[in-house]
Image: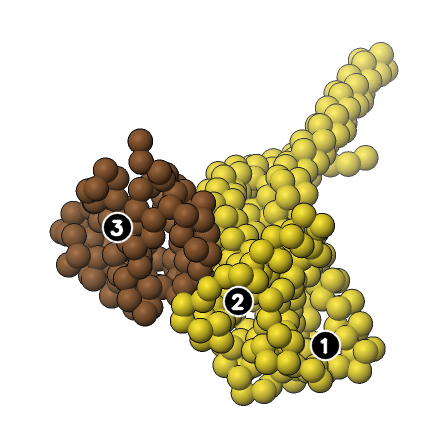
C-alpha cells in the first residue's frame, strides 16, 4: 500500500513541474510572436535578393562567373553550416537538425568529399561534438533568440567568406529549421555556394530572359563581387530568424504537451491518494468496531 | 497627375517604404542617380547616402541608407539596403542617442544620419 505522505510529496512535485512548464510555454508564446514577425518581415528582403541574384546567375557566363556564384569546378571540400538552438526543452527541434546533419555528412562523405562543419547554436554542437572531431570549422553560440541582430549574421558570413577565399572549402550549404507555423517546423537544406537558383518555373524563365537586357553599374563583375557576399549574409540572417522562430514554436508546443501530461499525472495520483486515504479510514473503522465487539 | 514609378525600400529588418513616386534620387556607388518612371532596366550598387523621394517637384521624404543594391526596371525601383533610417521625421538628437547605444558600423551609420538630418 503506497504511503500517503509519499503520494502527497509526489503530487506536489508534479504540480511544481507543471507550473514551470506552463510558464515556459507562456514565455515561448510571447516571444514567438515577436520572432515570427521578425522572420516574416525579413522575407521580402531575402526573397528580393534571391530574385536579383537568380537573374544575374541566369545571365552569367559559367566560365568567367565568380566562384561564389557558380562554385568551384572541383568541389572537394564542403562546408556545412548547422543551425540549432542554444537551449533544449523544445521537443524534436534539435534532434531533427542533428539527424539531418548526420545524414547530410554521410551523404557527402559517400560522394568522396571532405566535410567541414560550422556549428551555430549549442545543442547540435554538443550532440555532434564526439563525431566531428577535427572537421569542426567554427562554432558560435548565443546568436539566436527573439531578437536576432543582422550583425551576427554578417560576422558568420565574413568568417565563411574568409575561409572560402583562403580555399579551405569549395562549396557551402546550410541546414536549419524553417518556421512554417506554430506547430510545424521543417528541416531545410539550402546551398549558399554555388548559389541555389530555385528550380525556376516556366513563368520565371521568361523573367530571367528579360533580365539579360539589364544594364549594370558598375560593371557586372564588380557588382557581383559586392552583391554575393551580401547575399550570403542575408541568407544566413534569414536562416537565423527562421530558426529562432521555429525554436520558440517547438518549445511552445513541447511545453504545452508537458503541461497537459503533468495535469493527467496529477489527476491519476490524486485518485490513488484519495483511494488510499479512504482505505486507511475504512481500515481504522474496522479496527475500532472489532475492538468494541471484542469487549 | 504626373506619371509615377513604384518605389520599395527594403532592409533585412523590414520594408521601410513602398509608394508611388514621381522621381527618386539614389546614391549609386558611381554617383547620384535620379530615377524617373520608365527608366531603363539597371542594377546598381549603392553607397552610403541619401535617398530622396520627389513628389510634385519637391522632396517629400528622405532616407539615409548604408550601401546595398538597386534593382531598377521601367515600372519599379527596388532598393535593398543593409541599413536605413528615415530622415524626414527623425531628430538629430534622437539619432545621436541611438548611436551612443549602438556599436561598430551601426553607431557610425546613425551618427552620419544625425548629421544628415
Judging by the rendered image, the residue that carries numbered circle 3 is B52
Determine the secondary structure under disc 1: helix
Residue A112 place in picture, x, y as percent = 80, 82
Whether residue A122 can be seen here: no
Dot label at residue B16: none
Q: Is residue A56 above or below residue A139?
A: above
Tell whether A227 sits left or right of A182: left
Q: Chain of mark 1?
A: A
Locate residue A97, reporting x and y percent: 69, 60
The residue singled out by tag 1 in the image is: A131
- The hue used for chain A is yellow
Query: Relative to the observer, which residue lies in front, A130 or B89?
Result: B89
Q: Nearer the viewer, mark 2 or mark 1?
A: 2
Label 2 in the same subunit as label 1: yes
Label 3 residue SS:
strand
Q: Are marks 3 and 1 in contact (CB under 8 Å)?
A: no
Residue A283 relative to residue A252: left or right: right
- The residue that label 2 is drawn on is A232
* Looking at the image, residue A80 lies above or below residue A294: below
Q: Colour of chain B?
A: brown
Label 2, residues with CA under 10 Å away: few <14, some 14-19, many ≥20: many
Q: Position of residue B17 (x, y in %)?
A: 36, 43
- Disc 2 and disc 1: Cα gap in Å? 27 Å
Amino acid at each position: 500500500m503506497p504511503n500517503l505522505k509519499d503520494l502527497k510529496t509526489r503530487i506536489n512535485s508534479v504540480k511544481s513541474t507543471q507550473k514551470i512548464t506552463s510558464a515556459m510555454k507562456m514565455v515561448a508564446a510571447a516571444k514567438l510572436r515577436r520572432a515570427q514577425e521578425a522572420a516574416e518581415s525579413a522575407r521580402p528582403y531575402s526573397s528580393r535578393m534571391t530574385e536579383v541574384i537568380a537573374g544575374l546567375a541566369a545571365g552569367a557566363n559559367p566560365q568567367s562567373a565568380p566562384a561564389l556564384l557558380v562554385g568551384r569546378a572541383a568541389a572537394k571540400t564542403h562546408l556545412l553550416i548547422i543551425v540549432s538552438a542554444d537551449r533544449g526543452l523544445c521537443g524534436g527541434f534539435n534532434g531533427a537538425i542533428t539527424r539531418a546533419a548526420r545524414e547530410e555528412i554521410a551523404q557527402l562523405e559517400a560522394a568522396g568529399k571532405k566535410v567541414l562543419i560550422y556549428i551555430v547554436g549549442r545543442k547540435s554542437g554538443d550532440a555532434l561534438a564526439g563525431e566531428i572531431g577535427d572537421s569542426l570549422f567554427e562554432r558560435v553560440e548565443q546568436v539566436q533568440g527573439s531578437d536576432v541582430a543582422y550583425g551576427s549574421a554578417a560576422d558568420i558570413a565574413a568568417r565563411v567568406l574568409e575561409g572560402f577565399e583562403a580555399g579551405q572549402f569549395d562549396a557551402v550549404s546550410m541546414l536549419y529549421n524553417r518556421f512554417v507555423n506554430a506547430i510545424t517546423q521543417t528541416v531545410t537544406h539550402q546551398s549558399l555556394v554555388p548559389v541555389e537558383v530555385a528550380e525556376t518555373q516556366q513563368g520565371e524563365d521568361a523573367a530571367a530572359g528579360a533580365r539579360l537586357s539589364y544594364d549594370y553599374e558598375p560593371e557586372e563583375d564588380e557588382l557581383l563581387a559586392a552583391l554575393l557576399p551580401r547575399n550570403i549574409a542575408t541568407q544566413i540572417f534569414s536562416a537565423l530568424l527562421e530558426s529562432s522562430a521555429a525554436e520558440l514554436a517547438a518549445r511552445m508546443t513541447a511545453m504545452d504537451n508537458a503541461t497537459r501530461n503533468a495535469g493527467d499525472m496529477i489527476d491519476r495520483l490524486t485518485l490513488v491518494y484519495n483511494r488510499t486515504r479512504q482505505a486507511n479510514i475504512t481500515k481504522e473503522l474496522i479496527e475500532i468496531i472489532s475492538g468494541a465487539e471484542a469487549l | 497627375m504626373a506619371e509615377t514609378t513604384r518605389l520599395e525600400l527594403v532592409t533585412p529588418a523590414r520594408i521601410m517604404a513602398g509608394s508611388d513616386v514621381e522621381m527618386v534620387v539614389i546614391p549609386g556607388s558611381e554617383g547620384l542617380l535620379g530615377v524617373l518612371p520608365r527608366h531603363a532596366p539597371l542594377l546598381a550598387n549603392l553607397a552610403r547616402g541619401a535617398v530622396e523621394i520627389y513628389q510634385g517637384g519637391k522632396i517629400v521624404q528622405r532616407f539615409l541608407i548604408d550601401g546595398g543594391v538597386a534593382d531598377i526596371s521601367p515600372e519599379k525601383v527596388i532598393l535593398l539596403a543593409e541599413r536605413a533610417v528615415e530622415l524626414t521625421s527623425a531628430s538629430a538628437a534622437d539619432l545621436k542617442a541611438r548611436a551612443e547605444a549602438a556599436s561598430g558600423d551601426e553607431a557610425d551609420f546613425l551618427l552620419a544620419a544625425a548629421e544628415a538630418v
